[in-house]
Image (cartoon, rainbow, N blue to C red):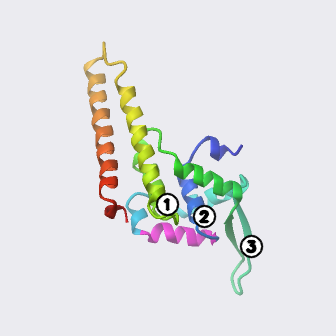
Amino acid sequence: MSPLLRAPLSTAYALLGFVHQGPLHGYEIYRRLTDTPELQAVWRIKQSHLYALLSRLEGEGLLRAELEIQDTRPPRKVYHLTTTGAQAFDRWLAEPVTIPREMRLDFMLKLYFALRDGHGQRTAVRLIRRQQDMCDEWLATQETGKENSTAYLLAVRRYRLSHIGAIREWLRSLLDDPVEMV
């Protein structure tokens, strides 16, 4: 099994998401990342890091590269999603994030692609509902161990409960007003 599938890296999955939409060369992917206002709000990546990730994904069999000959310039690699890569991306897109701090980047990337996967809002709604279920699991874990806690640990617990509550409210608002998701 690919190390990527064992240790998720949202940035790599996001690159798979761009190639999922059709074959692209590295600079096209970089331009889409830097020229997309929605992504600029949550994500930054250096061009050198992007090329390193593309190479890693190719090495793991999630992408396949073909050289494209250009008239006056050196050939460039055009990346195609493999079947394994498409399956990995689809699994990643369907799963909620597993810890609250992953909401800021990981969930936002998932939501971005879920809203653009060609199924309308169905994929996004499914993802949001799964994330709501995960929030319920997070809350359940906060209920244990509150006896004999120090003042600091109680403050941390209150912060976590507030954070999870804010996430739940935001997710609910996305479902309550689907116009906002378009």
Is 33 contained in the magenta span? Answer: yes
Q: Label 1, secondary structure: give it.
A: helix
Above or below residue 12? Residue 99 is: above
Q: Where, by quadrant of the figure, is residue 179 drawn?
A: bottom left
Say which label, 2 or 3, has the lower sequence index: 2
Magenta span main SS: helix
Q: Where, by quadrant of the figure, is residue 134 drawn?
A: top left
Q: Residues within 10 Å of mark 1 (few under 14, many from 20)?
A: some
In the image, residue 109 lies at what x, y percent? Answer: 46, 56
In the image, residue 53 lies at what x, y percent? Answer: 62, 56
Q: Label 3, secondary structure: give it.
A: strand
Name the residue: 48% across, 44% down: 96
Where is mark 3, residue-wise?
67
Q: Amino acid at mark 3?
A: Leu
Question: Which span is picked out in magenta?
Answer: 24-36
Q: Amino acid at mark 1?
A: Phe
Asked if residue 77 lies left or right of residue 127, the reply is right
Say which label, 1 or 2, has the lower sequence index: 2
Question: Which mark is drawn over residue 42?
Answer: none
Quadrant location of the N terminus in the rendered image: top right
Mark 2 or 3: the one toward you: 2
**In the foreground, 44 or 158:** 158
Q: Label 2, secondary structure: give it.
A: helix
- Give the spatial CA distance, label 1 vs label 3: 27 Å
Say which label, 1 or 3, has the lower sequence index: 3
Report if the CB atoms under discs 2 and 3 are less than 8 Å apart: no
Where is mark 2, residue-wise?
20
